Image (cartoon, rainbow, N blue to C red):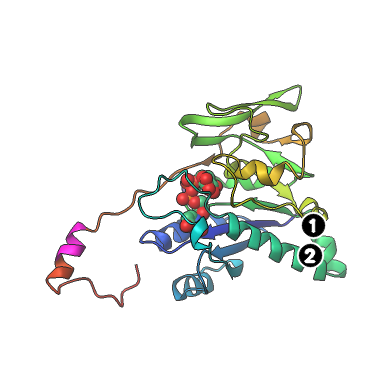
Amino acid sequence: PKIFVITPTYARLVQKAELTRLSHTFLHVPQLHWIVVEDAPQPTPLVTDFLAASGLTYTHLHKLTPKDRKLQEGDPSWLKPRGAEQRNEGLRWLREMGAAAKGKEAAGLEEAVVYFADDDNTYSLQLFEEMRYTYRVSVWPVGLVGGMKFERPVVEDGKVVRFHTGWRPNRPFPIDMAGFAVSLRLVLTNPQARFDGDAQMGFLESSFLQNLVTMDDLEPKADLCTKVLVWHTRTEKPKMKREDALQKQGLGSDPDVEV
Ligand code: UGA
Ligand code: MN
């Protein structure tokens, strides 16, 4: 089965570095279709050229987060959800593509899976083989998240019975975006399922999943959720102190060099 990976991304100094690292992971994954959704009013040359040279099968979309929904400089990072509009745009494209598919192509989509991969996390190759066979929603642990070594679904007798998490365990699905994949069939047969850009902190994943499954339906992967195969890494924002100082003297870096 095919894996459709939806990645929201936005312009910042580390963007190309993040996308480079991510693409090198994906190049090792068979049958992967990358849906890159820029948080921008139109596609940017950086991402357009990057994807064209990537060697991956991809779809390049864009959807600007409305200003009132976007985190402003100085806001705490938990104030508003990130990437919600972009993931919904990816879902919209999948549904449009699913509705248009015919014959052999449509048959190939029946077992496909959808994964939401942020551009800054770290993904093992094994993760993709774990998610590849997903009937409804598969789940697994996520490392370095929620102020813990890992969060994970707790499995008893092959079923998810609760979640190991340090924060609001009573959320419908206390699970990071990186910790689940959904069958394309479920996405197509539930056209109303989407991410709520107004969701309270920590409820973005639940806003999507609660329209699709119950805890009982979850398919535990990664050796019954005992292995960490994805890490919620976050990249440090580079300091531009010297750059700014040189710029003031008219000696800034050549703006024609893409970073
Ligand atoms: C955590 C979760 O891992 C995210 O999946 C979730 O979207 C986020 O919290 C949230 O609460 O909204 P975190 O590391 O804090 O992740 O979020 P980022 O990695 O900064 O952003 C998630 C994705 O959205 C990234 O792919 C990023 O490139 C994208 N993004 C971020 C945008 O498209 N626009 C933005 O303005 C910011
Ligand atoms: Mn992140």
Q: Residue at x 42, y 61 (%)?
A: 15
**Residue at the limit of the structure toward the top, as seen here:** 156
Label 1 amino acid?
A: Leu
- Nearest to the observer: residue 91 or residue 108: 91
Q: Secondary structure at mark 1?
A: helix
Sequence-first disc among 1 and 2:
2
How many residues crowd mark 2 within 10 Å: few (<14), some (14–19), many (20+)?
A: some
Q: Position of residue 43 (x, y in %)?
A: 52, 74
Q: Position of residue 53 (x, y in %)?
A: 50, 72
**Residue at the limit of the structure toward the right, as seen here:** 103
Above or below for 153 versus 204: above
Q: Residue at x 57, y 64 (%)?
A: 37
Rendered image quadrant of residue 222: top right
Left or right side of 2 for 65: left
How many residues crowd mark 1 within 10 Å: few (<14), some (14–19), many (20+)?
A: some
| Residue 30 numbered tag | none
Q: Split into 4 quadrants, where in the image is the C terminus?
A: bottom left
What residue sits right under mark 1 in the picture? 188
Above or below for 14 versus 105: above
Tell me if residue 225 is in the magenta stretch: no
| Residue 98 numbered tag | 2
Q: Position of residue 130 (x, y in %)?
A: 67, 42
Do labels 1 and 2 touch, CB within 8 Å? yes
Q: Split into 4 quadrants, where in the image is the N terminus?
A: bottom right
Left or right side of 63 for 107: right
Magenta range is 241-245
Mark pair 1, 2: CA separation: 7 Å
